Image (tube, rainbow, N blue to C red):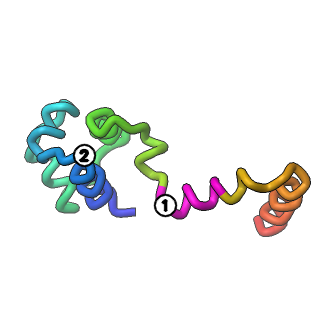
Amino acid sequence: MDVGKRITQLREELHLTTNKLANISGVTQSYLRDIELGKKQPTVEYLSYICYGLNITLSDFFKTETDDALEKAIARLNEDQKKRLTAFINSML
């Protein structure tokens, strides 16, 4: 996952400028811009600040549409199907 592109995507979905997100997150605008451009990689600590500014959790940050679709599909399975799916996944590890 490209962290910078993900931040940009989420920031734009919220109609936030880089400056506004930086202010909310407590990071400098230049640091945030460098992350979005792929020039720097944030530490977990700084990424958590940015997630705070985006009003999401770190888990939400790394969740993709594919993850959401998979979770929804699994939720529709009955208990026996879930057990068989778990067994299948474990057999692949």
Residue reaching furthest to the right: 80
Mark 2: amino acid? Leu
Q: Is 3 rendered above or below residue 14?
A: below
Residue at numbered disc 2 = 14
Q: Is 50 rendered above or below residue 4?
A: above
- What are the residue bounds of the magenta stretch? 64-72
The quarter of the image holding the N terminus is bottom left
15 left or right, relative to 7? left
At horizontal 64% and vertical 55% (from top left) the residue drawn is 72
SS for dot 1: helix
Q: Is the residue marked by circle 2 packed among few (<14), some (14-19), or many (20+) residues within 10 Å?
A: few
Q: Is the residue marked by circle 1 packed among few (<14), some (14-19), or many (20+) residues within 10 Å?
A: few
> Is residue 63 in view from this perspective?
yes
12 left or right, relative to 30? right
Q: Is residue 48 magenta?
A: no
User: Could you say where residue 10 lies in the image, as x and y percent from the top left?
Assistant: 29, 51
83 left or right, relative to 45? right
The quarter of the image holding the C terminus is bottom right
Residue at numbered disc 1 = 65
Q: Which mark is residue 10?
A: none
Q: Main secondary structure of the magenta part?
A: helix
User: Could you say where residue 43 lies in the image, as x and y percent from the top left?
Assistant: 32, 43
At horizontal 22% and vertical 33% (from top left) the residue drawn is 25
Q: Nearer the viewer, residue 69 or 43?
A: 69
Q: Quadrant of residue 37?
A: bottom left
Q: Earlier in the sequence, mark 2 or mark 1?
A: 2
Q: Quadrant of residue 21?
A: top left
Mark 1: amino acid? Glu
At horizontal 15% and vertical 54% (from top left) the residue drawn is 34
